[in-house]
Image: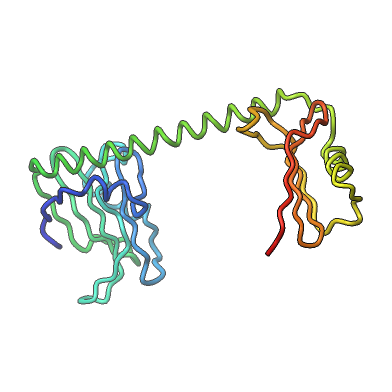
């Protein structure tokens, strides 16, 4: 088992990078697996937590990844977490879930700083996820409340008529409701292609009015 490494000053930026996956009150670093493990990451974490006598909500995960030990030829999970003023480090066999090695150290000032950075990063991701969910719910409610007096087929027909085309002339067509930030409303997004031209229309679903239209040419 490796000894505790000195906490680097740039850890917070690293914790927020795309290489970290955040869980409840913590984060887990993820490494590509060198093989196919019979034991899942969740099972390995649960084995370590059970041995230490904690629940997932009681700890702050520092690391949980699948690795290959060149010395022993064993595929293993490395699971490290903070709990009860201690840092727990486990090596879990990826085939049997047996504990290969275990280490427990008393947390020092650097460990507390690292744990705080992990908690703040996890809280930031949780808040961002909640905001995204709230925005999606608001959008769905707005779409449900929006008056729809024309159908998708009618919206396509309006766009085709404006372009001077008929349905049998286009090679591709797609019409769907979408929330448009530019107009602050849900409208029909209509797209169709003729040759090297791609037509895009935004159509008011209540009135059938064309809000915007563009024509793009392929190179």
Residue 217 in view in this figure? yes
Quadrant, the N terminus = bottom left
Q: Measured from the top left, where is residue 52 in percent x and y?
A: 21, 46
Q: How many marks?
A: 0
Question: Image point 34% across, 62% down: which residue?
Answer: 31
**147 sits left or right of 123 in the view:** right
Q: Is residue 193 above or below residue 49?
A: below
Quadrant, the C terminus = bottom right
Question: Image point 75% across, 54% down: which residue?
Answer: 198
Q: Is residue 39 above or below residue 81?
A: below
Question: Image point 47% across, 31% down: which residue?
Answer: 131
- Residue 205, by quadrant, is top right
Q: Measured from the top left, where is residue 17 in percent x and y?
A: 33, 50
Q: Measured from the top left, where is residue 217 in percent x and y?
A: 72, 58
Q: Nearer the viewer, residue 61 or 39?
A: 61
Residue 176 in view in this figure? no
């Amino acid at each position: 088992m490796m000894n505790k490494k000195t906490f680097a000053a740039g850890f917070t930026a690293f914790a927020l990078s795309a290489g970290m996956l955040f869980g409840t009150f913590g984060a887990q670093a993820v490494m590509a697996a060198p093989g196919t493990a019979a034991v899942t990451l969740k099972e390995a974490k649960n084995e370590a937590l059970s041995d230490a006598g904690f629940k997932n909500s009681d700890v702050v995960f520092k690391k949980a990844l699948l690795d290959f030990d060149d010395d022993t030829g064993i595929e293993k999970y490395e699971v490290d977490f903070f709990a009860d003023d201690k840092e727990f480090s486990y090596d879990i066999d990826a085939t049997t879930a047996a504990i290969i090695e275990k280490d427990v150290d008393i947390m020092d000032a650097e460990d507390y700083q690292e744990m705080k950075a992990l908690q703040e990063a996890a809280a930031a991701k949780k808040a961002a996820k909640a905001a995204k969910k709230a925005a999606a719910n608001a959008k769905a409610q707005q779409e449900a409340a929006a008056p729809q007096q024309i159908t998708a087929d009618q919206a396509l027909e309006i766009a085709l008529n404006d372009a001077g085309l008929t349905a049998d002339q286009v090679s591709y067509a797609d019409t769907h409701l979408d929330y448009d930030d530019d107009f602050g409303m849900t409208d029909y997004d209509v797209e169709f292609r003729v040759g090297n031209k791609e037509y895009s229309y935004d159509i008011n679903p209540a009135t059938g009015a064309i809000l915007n239209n563009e024509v793009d040419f392929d190179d």
